Image (spheres, helix red, strand yellow):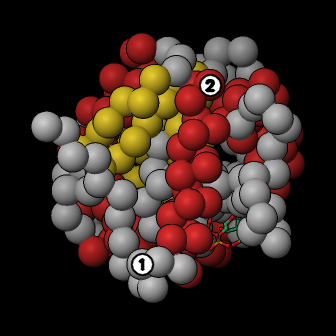
Amino acid sequence: MSTISIIGSGSMATAVAGRIAKAQHTVEVVNRDAAKARALADKLAGKATTGTYGAAPAGDIVILAVPYGSVAALVADFGDALDGKVIIDLTNPIKADMTGLATPAGSSGAQETAKILPAGVHVVKAFNTIFGHMLAKGGRLDAFIAADDTQAKARVSTLLESLGLRPLDVGALNMAHTLEALGLMMISLAKNGAGSWNIAMKAEIG
Ligand SMILES: NC(=O)c1ccc[n+]([C@@H]2O[C@H](COP(=O)([O-])OP(=O)(O)OC[C@H]3O[C@@H](n4cnc5c(N)ncnc54)[C@H](OP(=O)(O)O)[C@@H]3O)[C@@H](O)[C@H]2O)c1
């Protein structure tokens, strides 16, 4: 099994890393606060290591599990250390007042992030439509993904399958804005019609 690196050690990082560790991959946790990375690595069931913030991550797949508003600073902190990686962007670039998305019209957080990453990076949008606590519960949840690079998308699909999720390809990276809108919709649905955060989006394929 492979090494997957995750940058961040908050709620979503904990849920995703937990799922990855259970699937017997090695998780490398990286955080700007090394003690927080160590604390998460120690909590994980499987093999877990910690990496140095700003240095080249061990995994070929690197998950950015930080707020969208922090991504530009993170990318600057890592610079070329992320070159050649498949980057999973799970952020939901939602305005603080929850009224919409904080991205330029006609773009998405994933595309904006791709623009500032080194040229050899392939960005895959994934995980952003699933609540962390639902991921942690287990189950074959639908995991929508979008990416331009076919190989990167295939590698992330294989990873998602190995985690017991159902990868569903929604198209190229320009479709990430639809997944980000879906992330916002899930939050609004939880607060309104569903009346519960224990919800997950499922595509019925007839
Ligand atoms: N929570 C969910 O259910 C969920 C579901 C789908 C998508 N997401 C997305 O997942 C991302 C993370 O959400 P979360 O709920 O995990 O948030 P969180 O619990 O607040 O964790 C945020 C993490 O980002 C790190 N971070 C913040 N600013 C940083 C910076 N400038 N440089 C480096 N690291 C930084 C924090 O580090 P410190 O610990 O050092 O502060 C922390 O580890 C968000 O983009 C969110 O939209 C969340």
Dot 2: element: helix
Dot 1: element: loop
Q: Is residue 195 left or right of residue 88?
A: left
For label 1, count other residues whose C-alpha is less than 10 Å away and answer few (under 14), some (14-19) or many (20+): few
Quadrant hosting ligand 1? bottom right
Residue marked by disc 2: 174
Residue marked by disc 1: 194
The x, y position of residue 47, in whole percent, is 31, 59
- Residue type beneath disc 1: Ala
- Give the Cα distance between marks 1 and 2: 29 Å
Between 53 and 118, the residue placed more toward the observer is 118
Q: At 62% from the left edge and 25% from the top edge, which residue is drawn?
A: 174
Q: Is residue 155 visible?
A: yes
Q: Is residue 134 left or right of residue 23?
A: right
Give the numbered dot on residue 124: none
Between 8 and 32, the residue placed more toward the observer is 8
Q: Is residue 21 visible?
A: no
Between 49 and 166, the residue placed more toward the observer is 166
Q: At 81% from the left edge and 51% from the top edge, which residue is drawn?
A: 102
